[in-house]
Amino acid sequence: MSALLDLLTLTPDGEDGWVGPGAGPVGKRSFGGLFAAQSLAAACCSVAGDKRPTNMHLQFLRGGEAGDSSDYRVERIYDGRTAAARRVETRQHGRLLNTATVSFSVPLAGPEHGIRSSMPAHPDTLEQTGPPGPAPSLPLDELDIRVADDRSGGEFVRRMWWRTRFDLPAQDLLHTLVAVYVTDLYGIDPILQVHGHAMAARTHRGGTTDSSIWFHQPLRADQWNLLESRSPAAAGGRGVVTASLVREDGVIAATVVQEGLAADR
């Protein structure tokens, strides 16, 4: 059995309610990517037919306990012929931790673009670095992660290649959930890296406060994907990171924007 797939499998709990397992040492803060992926999974459980998620916006309100399960309640905001919307609340022991909104749509015909003409060095040429810092809540033995930071162009750019170390079933949603899970892995670190710091060094208070992701094209989480991110601005103890999630063939699968706390200790 896969620990990662177990984390993304929710248990029904009454009408429009689900429970997601926790992960990590007792007393540690929950991994935000787990909340994001489980929130999306809960929203998808309430949408029938051929509608697929097009975007998710999640606000992190409080930190959670890594080892504890979480309760997800879904509100059916809208159900139309081609579109739907859901609101999801995450709680632990009755305390509200996160709120998310998820939009769905039936795929429609229209103009398409979003293919890169060139790609950086292939991950097979890079060291197996693992994540940019400690990640005790993640099943790291199931993820191949290779990070290559670049400052050659005058700005800090993080290129994080990733894939699962095992084959996944051919279910688009499952691959999307894994991608959402991975995107929060030190996602706001570029805010500090611009100034020569790092989240792993704990020189600043940091954590994701807000995350948005737009889904453009399907991807395979068991094949190489590139999360390329940079931070365009920071002020007032917070900063923003913009990122593209790119398949190995250059197709942009998703766009990610995160806000994070980056405050002096």
Image: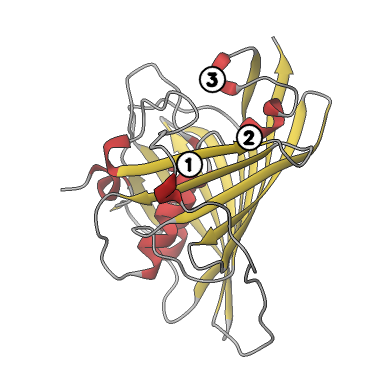
Q: Which residue type carries mark 1? A: Gly
Q: Nearer the viewer, mark 2 or mark 1?
A: 2
Q: Label 1 belongs to which residue?
A: 33
Mark closer to the chain start, 2 or 1? 1
C-alpha distance separating marks 2 and 1: 12 Å
Q: Measuring 52% from the left and 53% from the top, which residue is drawn there?
A: 226
The outermost residue toward the left is 1
92 left or right, relative to 194: left
C-alpha distance separating marks 3 and 2: 11 Å
Label 2 with label 1: CB-CB less than 8 Å: no
C-alpha distance separating marks 3 and 1: 17 Å
Viewer-side residue, 122 vs 101: 122
Q: Residues within 10 Å of mark 1 (few under 14, many from 20)?
A: many
Provide residue 263's location: percent of width, then percent of height: 73, 19
- Specify whether residue 46 is in view: yes
Label 3 with label 1: CB-CB less than 8 Å: no
Mark closer to the chain start, 3 or 2? 2
Q: Measuring 33% from the left and 58% from the top, which residue is drawn there?
A: 222
Q: Which mark is residue 200?
A: 3
The outermost residue toward the bottom is 109
Provide residue 188's location: percent of width, then percent of height: 63, 34
Q: Label 2 belongs to which residue?
A: 188
Q: Which residue type carries mark 2? A: Ile
Q: Secondary structure at mark 2?
A: loop
Q: Measuring 29% from the left and 52% from the top, which residue is drawn there?
A: 9
Q: Secondary structure at mark 3?
A: helix
Q: In which quadrant is the C terminus drawn?
A: top right
Mark closer to the chain start, 3 or 1? 1
